[in-house]
Amino acid sequence: MKILLTADWHIRGDRPRCRTDENWLESQREDIMAVERVAREHQVDAVWILGDLFHQPRCATEAVNMVLGALNSIREVCPVRILPGNHDLPYHDFDNLNACSLGIVYQAHHLMLRTDNGDDDEGYAELRTSNGKLRTLYATPFGREDMEGLRVFNNDIWATHQLTFPSDKDRPVEGVGVTADDLLEAAPNVRVILTGDYHHGYIRNQGNRRVITPGCLNIQVADMWEYRPRVYILDTDTLEAETVYLEGHRGDIVTDYLVTEKERDARMEKVLSVIGDAEGVSLSFPDNLEREIAKPEYKNAQRVYPELLDKLNKDRK
């Protein structure tokens, strides 16, 4: 059995600042069709989307309709299963599934990556290999990860959606997310861990065990303009994965706004530095006004200050 692994499509109605596509919705559809072509060419048995199908819980109607149509095309090739991610769920809570765009997709097609042995939306399932052997799967939607309980897992595959870096050096901030080695250590009896959320695809091998993170489907931030979106094809017989790069719609990506953002960040740092170094600085306008109006040069204004303060506090109509 071959499973195509993809994640972090982040489908959205609004066009990201770094993109100049004339028809952003069509560009996203072409990216999804690239997944469909790989599924067809490699004759995979299933497509698993490992979280963040949408960029926000409630996506534009046109984008949701586009996704429904595109998933229909993939389903003509093979079944599709989707794992809820943090961007998919209102307040990052799986209990809010029915109040989001992913819930519409789920109700329309019942595409959840979930157990086949009951009514639970997470849990144990079995996958049959080409020679009839069974592989066990445990899938947990975002927010349902139990890191302390992973040591009792005794499954071949664990699918989750959490920020997992290839190594410590890839973390932008210490203590953010986990590393691939952290997950392998937390779940010592799991052979393959599938994750989403991290947008650079990678495979982290540790002996005959591995973490697979597919990365994002399309480029939505300028500093990833050189990144090549990809999918991985997992062979359930060997539990090894093949990398397949996507030929979707890359479009034109601009980076000019990064200069503006850098200048803005520099100004912000200056403001924070002034606030941190100066005594008596407040973010309250009345407080700053009171401090300034106490200066001798504003003596005439001091007599109307109480009335002005009343108006600022909305104590007078």
Image: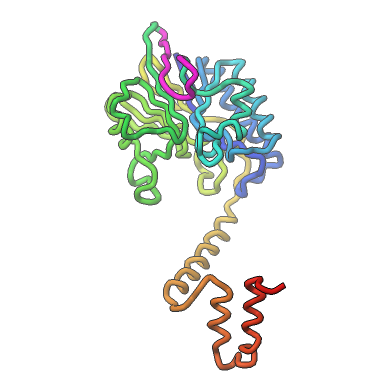
Number of numbered callouts drawn = 0
Instruction: Kindly indicate the quadrant of the structure image that contains residue 206.
Output: top left
Colouring used for the render: rainbow
Horizontal arrangement in the rendering, residue 13 relative to residue 152 (left or right): right
Q: If the image is split into quadrants, where does the C terminus sit?
A: bottom right
Q: Residue furthest top?
A: 132
Task: Name the one closer to the observer, 126 or 264.
Answer: 126
Instruction: Kindly indicate the quadrant of the structure image that contains residue 128.
Output: top left
Residue visible at 64% across and 73% down? 312
The image shows residue 213 at horizontal and vertical percentages of: 43, 33
Q: If the image is split into quadrants, where does the N terminus sit?
A: top left
Horizontal arrangement in the rendering, residue 293 relative to residue 194 (left or right): right
Which stretch appears magenta? 117-130
Q: Is residue 5 visible?
A: yes
Asked if residue 124 is among those painted magenta in the image, a careful observer would answer yes
Residue visible at 64% across and 25% down? 70
The image shows residue 171 at horizontal and vertical percentages of: 38, 47
Residue visible at 37% across and 30% down? 211
**Is 278 drawn above or below residue 72 in the view shown?**
below
Residue visible at 38% across and 17% down? 136
The image shows residue 220 at horizontal and vertical percentages of: 57, 43
Q: Is residue 229 visible?
A: no
Task: Name the one closer to the observer, 281 or 231.
Answer: 281
Task: Name the one closer to the observer, 166 or 123.
Answer: 123
The image shows residue 210 at horizontal and vertical percentages of: 34, 28
Instruction: Kindly indicate the quadrant of the structure image that contains residue 160.
Output: top left
